[in-house]
Amino acid sequence: MSESLNILFENIDIYSPSDNFHERRNLWIKGDTIQACTSAPVKAEKATKRIDARSLAAMPGLFDMHVHLREPGQEYKETIQTGTDSAKNGGFTGVCCMPNTIPAIDNAPTVEYIINRGKTTLTEVHVCASITKGREGKELAPMLELKQHGAVMFSDDGACVMNAEVMNRAFKYLKPVDGLISQHCEEHTLTEGFAMHDGEVSAILGLKGYPSIAEEIIVARDIMLAAHNGNCRYHVSHLSTAGSIDLVRQAKLRGQRVTCEVTPHHFTLTDEAVRHYDTNAKMNPPLRTKQDIEAIITAVKDGTVDAIATDHAPHAVHEKELEFAQAANGITGLETSFGLSMTHLVHAGHIGMMRLVELMSTMPREILGLQQVSCVEGALANLTIADLHEEWTFSAAKSLSKSKNTPFGGFVLRGKPKFAINRGQIWECDL
Ligand SMILES: [Zn+2]
């Protein structure tokens, strides 16, 4: 593979926040390396494939720090292979997978198994291991050992560590190595049996609601625990409410090392999407209100939000085609993330491209302590190539994920991933 890749993108618009430049250049990739990146003419070889790239943009490869690859244990929903196929088709060259597998990622062999399975895929796979054994919230997992084996973050995602004493000990335990703890913030006693956001729409539909405060209570508690243990690092997963945004913003102002991610569905859809009982509008945390979206977008603009992550959560048809209250939570997201973010953040005029690249590429890597991707001559070629203006209609049928549970089928988006390049491999996105 690496021998064959030899491609020159002529006059491509390059956005690279970590190299601090935005410029049109000629970008020559040979094998796994950027052979040239210059505004001067490039003397490529005869064998080099030349692409007139005036309508394209290049950026450090997109990274999704919150995905569910379902392997081991639920391969009928997704595998590491199909999940990374879906990722590269969405333009992502790196992902971090969550530990709610069967068994949970709470032991070194499982961490190693996943890392090994992701060694040859175009999209790199990093591992978020669990905070507690079996994600039961009781006894700490051997996090130091799991970190030595390559885990880059810890979370019981899907479940919240409810016991404050356990969470306190988790912060203490990881402090000597400055490990990163993330939380799926949900006070489960307030959300039991929920089907959607607790508000006007849930009252009309007669569905059990998940109140915003159930998320915010945990965000507040954990920020306090992180401070109590000496400014530990703490990352809020898929934050969904205006109140949570405010808590993170205040913590940052106090100098706390708190970061957070938001999903494209939480800044594009509201609980109105549930009105017709479409189970593809059912997720955890649930779709919230217009005011929450406004708060999230303000926070994306002012730097309170650090990253965009999809919470890609594939489910089989039989788990979604049920009565709304019984259907599984979660939607797929890897192939719509770039288009939705371009449409609703960049083309809507809220942020510029450099900021988008930060949110979708450089910041996730920085939070996870991974090496930054560089777009200069001699660097390893880890890139996403996109058409920033192309209008296209998303079709779930084209998704390479094993599952098709998306509410975005038929959505018209502006901005489309075209190629993913990494590890000497190139993938032409087909969406
Ligand atoms: Zn979660």
Image (cartoon, rainbow, N blue to C red):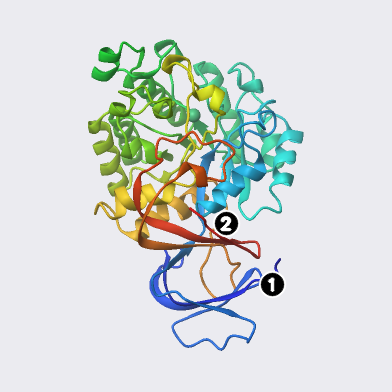
Can I make out residue 86 in this image? yes
The image shows residue 378 at horizontal and vertical percentages of 60, 74
From this view, report whether residue 261 is shown above or below residue 88: above
Q: Name the residue under label 2.
A: 371
Identify the residue shown where x is 31% and y is 10%. 206
344 sits to left or right of 18: left
**Residue 90 versus residue 351: which sits nearer the camera?**
90
Identify the residue shown where x is 48% and y is 24%. 329
From this view, report whether residue 201 is shown above or below residue 344: above
Give neighbour class at mark 2: few <14, some 14-19, many 20+ (Cα, 10 Å).
few
From this view, report whether residue 304 is shown above or below residue 134: below
Give neighbour class at mark 1: few <14, some 14-19, many 20+ (Cα, 10 Å).
some
Identify the residue shown where x is 61% and y is 47%. 84
Q: Quadrant of the N terminus?
A: bottom right
**Residue 317 versus residue 104: which sits nearer the camera?**
317
Q: Name the residue under label 1.
A: 4
Query: Hey, which quadrant is residue 105 in on the image?
Result: top right
Identify the residue shown where x is 47% and y is 35%. 234
Name the element at disc 2.
loop
Q: How far apart are marks 1 and 2 (CA)?
A: 26 Å
From this view, report whether residue 145 is shown above or below residue 116: above
116 sits to left or right of 215: right
Name the element at disc 1.
loop
